[in-house]
Image (tube, rainbow, N blue to C red):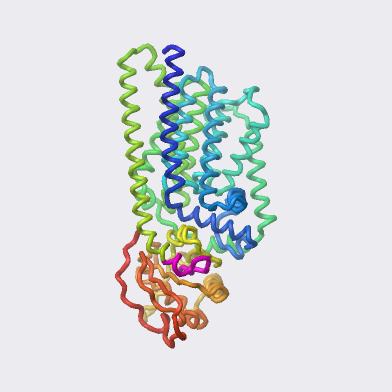
Amino acid sequence: MTGAADRAARLILWLLLGGLAAAGAHYALTKSMHQDVAYYVNAVERWLDGARLYRDLIDVNVPTVYWLMAAPVWVARRLDVPSTIAFNLFVLALATLSVGTVWSLARRGLRNPGWLPDALAGVLLLWFVALVGHDFGQREHLATILLAPYAVARAAAVGDDRARLWVRIAIGLCAGIGLALKPYFALILLGMEGALLLRRGRDWRPSAETAALVLAAGACAAATVLLVPAYLDRVVPLARATYHGFEWPVATVIGWQGPRTFGSFAIALLCIPLAWAMDRRQGDLAAVLSGAALGGFASFLIQSKGWLYQLTPALTYSFAAFAVAAAALGSRWLSGRGRAATALLSVCLGILLAAILLEFGRLYGSDAALRERQAPLVEALREHAQEGPALFISLDVDYTFPGVNYAGAAYPYRWHHLLPLPGLYRDFVPGPEGRLFRAPAEMGPIERDFFESFVADALAHPPRIVLVDRRRPVRPGLSPELDLLAYFCQSAPFAELMSGFDWLGRRGTYDVLIPRAGAPSSHGPCGAPRPQFPVAANS
């Protein structure tokens, strides 16, 4: 291919990628925000208003995500724009910077790079902006973005004096922050470095990027211990005692995400032997990305939750490794094969484009269905709790947020969902009378503290609307007949608070209560049978 033809082909490729990325950015900015991300946006807003982490905001995750999200939320407040939009723009900016850095490092650090930097950067751009789908902004997504330049720098730019030291340090610092978002992400780093060690043997050495990564991750850990002692004092014991309630057997986890799990694992394994047939640095790059994918796969399995977003690093890095191998080995195969090879390549790219467009259609359709399910709840919140407290009683967070964010309601409570209950009741055996939960006198210290703090919050911030989740619990060991409102009605002060509420009806999968127009009822929702609204299906 002549120089002019090569430049024209690259221009066409990047115009196409730019169009797909623009479509992905539109989806990211207009879709319903992932519930966990929406919670963190809301929690960071409360933290900036003076709420204390792990005292006024109970969460089992390390504080790094709060610190990372503080900047876009703070800027959003100064500019008077929605924090949800500001955070999504922040993630898009991170993704763009990461992809640009990857392309530049691969272009400078590889010998005869050809189309490899474009293929790698293009695949990462599509995953970072578009194919991550509903999980946009999750911690796994952020970590994958922040660690990608580190992977390329370790493999392709080692010993490259043209890369300025401050750039390499910045790459390592960003990677360290990404690593510190969740302890399990250390497995991704181990996968990268293990692959390099396998390739280089005694020639393996840490680099400036590695030192900066360790420094940043260590600083985050030290800051957690020194600045947020409540995390170790209160949250770690809580997590140890209760978080197993969200865990499933490994076979179940693999079954839920079977094709994705096996697919990413197989691609990552395939690229390791392919790396030995490539140029040294190109092979190192394919191996490092494969190692990152296998580390992400191990992280997914060890967490034992089966949630799709936890596969983001494995999926992204496995396809990135395959792009490197395909670009490096495919260019050799295509060289000198003429029009037939070019036609075959065009057909393959056309099939890939069609698959991406179909995925876009699926994502937009799925988001439309999600918004339709959320709409009744958001409307109820806007009508009854505009800028006021809304109390959700649910084992999940998937409607509380982003419902609270979009409706402009307030959520001043410590527990964003009933986090300890699945673990506390995983092995619970109902008594002879069939009661599905413990009486307050029977509760252990952790459950009693949770129970009393939930009630105290409801009394301190009387809600304008109460929403009780009526989906059948799907956590291991929880009875599908568990009545969450009846659980808290065991508290006399809470029952008295509820006596001032009446049933409004079913909104989505929630039974909704609003304050009575007249005097409190002698019975109230806690003292009378619940109206038989239609049974809510799981969603």
Relative to 500, does residue 537 appear above or below in the rendering? Answer: above
Please name whichever residue, 371 or 230, is drawn nearer the observer in this view of the structure. Answer: 371
Q: Position of residue 311 (x, y in %)?
A: 44, 45
Q: Magenta part of the protein: which range?
A: 380-392
Q: Nearer the viewer, residue 330 or 381?
A: 381
| Residue 357 in sight | yes
Relative horizontal placement of residue 376, taking residue 440 as reference (left or right):
left
- Residue 381 drawn in magenta: yes
Q: Is residue 159 left or right of residue 451?
A: right
The residue depicted at 47 percent of the width and 76 percent of the height is 488
Q: Residue furthest bottom?
A: 522
Q: Nearer the viewer, residue 56 or 197?
A: 56
Residue 37 percent coordinates (x, y): 50, 53
Q: Residue 112 placed where, x, y %?
A: 51, 17
Q: Which residue is at a point 45% across and 14% down the rendered structure image?
A: 4
Quadrant holding the C terminus: bottom left
Q: Quadrant of residue 20?
A: top left
Quadrant of residue 237 within the rendered picture? bottom right
In the displayed structure, 9 sits above or below 508; it is above
> What residue is shown at x 48% (from left), y 66% (from top)?
418
> Where the N terminus falls, by quadrant?
top left
Vertical side of 152 occupied by 85: above or below: below
Along the horizontal axis of the image, is 308 left or right of 52?
Answer: left
Asked whether residue 197 appears in the rendered view, the answer is: no
- Measured from the top left, where is residue 210 in percent x and y? 63, 35
> Which residue lies most toward the right here?
226
Is residue 303 highlighted in magenta? no
Q: Residue furthest front?
A: 80
Q: Nearer the viewer, residue 322 or 528?
A: 528
